[in-house]
């Protein structure tokens, strides 16, 4: 689709793939330091967390279990809409230390709702890691325990984050020109 190529051509590069990889290593170290003896259940939030999860997991040096949930908030729009569950968290979280992985913390609805569900289902503790934390300049209902990098309050894409469904595959992070 030509349109997706045009979007990329007009976008601004925020972080190169080298910067992204450095931030990834950093967040992996933080998680290794904190969760090494917890044998967590890692829950990846599909689809945005697919790249972050796939690259983070091999950098974690302790035993863990892996599962996923699928929720989408944006659909194809650029602004948050209703949360739509496709795969919900399930009973396997009971009694576990859970680590939620998501691509980006924006308003914080997705992770705060997810965290509540996981705790309702009987998880012992729920941590969260996001690759990007959007600087909205307002308090969010949840803050992530582990953050890869901060991004400005703009619509960003790449490294798992989509723009109108496209470009999750980019290794760097871009912002739509305003
Ligand atoms: P929140 O519920 O407002 O925190 O939104 C988080 C979800 O919205 C993330 O899981 C992303 O999938 C999506 N999202 C938020 N901001 C962006 C963005 O700038 N680009 C792409 N996706 C985004
Ligand atoms: Mg998402």
Image: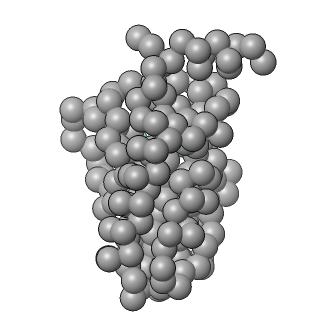
Furthest-front residue in this view = 18
Q: Position of residue 17 (x, y in %)?
A: 50, 41
**Residue 132 on image: x %, y %:** 40, 44
Query: Residue 177 location in percent, x, y?
Result: 45, 13
Q: Residue furthest bottom?
A: 37
From the viewer's perspective, is 156 left or right of 2? Answer: left
Horizontal arrangement in the rendering, residue 152 relative to residue 111 (left or right): left
Q: Is residue 81 left or right of residue 84?
A: left
Indicate whether 148 appears above or below 57. Answer: above
Quarter that holds the N terminus: top right
**Which image quarter holds the C terminus?**
top left
Which residue is found at the position 32% from the left and 30% from the top?
Answer: 152
Question: Can residue 14 be seen here?
Answer: yes
Q: Residue 7, position in %: x, y? A: 60, 16
Q: Is residue 78 above or below residue 134?
A: above
* In the rendered image, the vertical position of residue 13 relative to residue 119, given as above or below: above
Which of the pair 113/149 is nearer the observer?
149
Q: Looking at this view, name the residue that lies furthest to the right.
A: 1
Residue 107 at least partly seen: no
At 53% across and 76% down in the image, what residue appears? 41
Query: What number of labels is visible?
Result: 0
Q: Residue at x 43, y 79 (%)?
A: 97
Task: In this rendered view, identify the residue nearer to me: 88 or 164.
Answer: 164
Quadrant in the picture for residue 113: bottom left
User: What colour-coding does the image apply?
Assistant: one colour
Q: Residue at x 22, y 35 (%)?
A: 138
């Amino acid at each position: 689709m030509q349109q997706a190529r045009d979007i990329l051509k007009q976008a601004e590069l925020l972080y190169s793939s080298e910067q992204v990889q450095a931030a990834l290593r950093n967040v992996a170290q933080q998680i290794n330091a904190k969760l090494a003896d917890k044998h967590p259940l890692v829950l990846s939030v599909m689809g945005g967390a697919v790249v972050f999860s796939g690259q983070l997991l091999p950098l974690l040096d302790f035993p863990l279990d892996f599962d996923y949930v699928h929720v989408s908030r944006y659909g194809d729009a650029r602004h948050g809409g209703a949360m739509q569950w496709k795969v919900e968290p399930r009973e396997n979280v009971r009694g576990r230390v859970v680590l939620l992985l998501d691509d980006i913390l924006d308003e914080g609805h997705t992770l705060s709702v997810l965290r509540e569900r996981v705790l309702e289902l009987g998880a012992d503790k729920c941590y969260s890691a996001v690759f990007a934390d959007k600087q909205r300049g307002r308090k969010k209902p949840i803050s992530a325990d582990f953050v890869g990098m901060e991004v400005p309050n703009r619509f960003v894409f790449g490294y798992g984050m989509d723009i109108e469904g496209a470009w999750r595959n980019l290794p760097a992070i871009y912002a739509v020109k305003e």
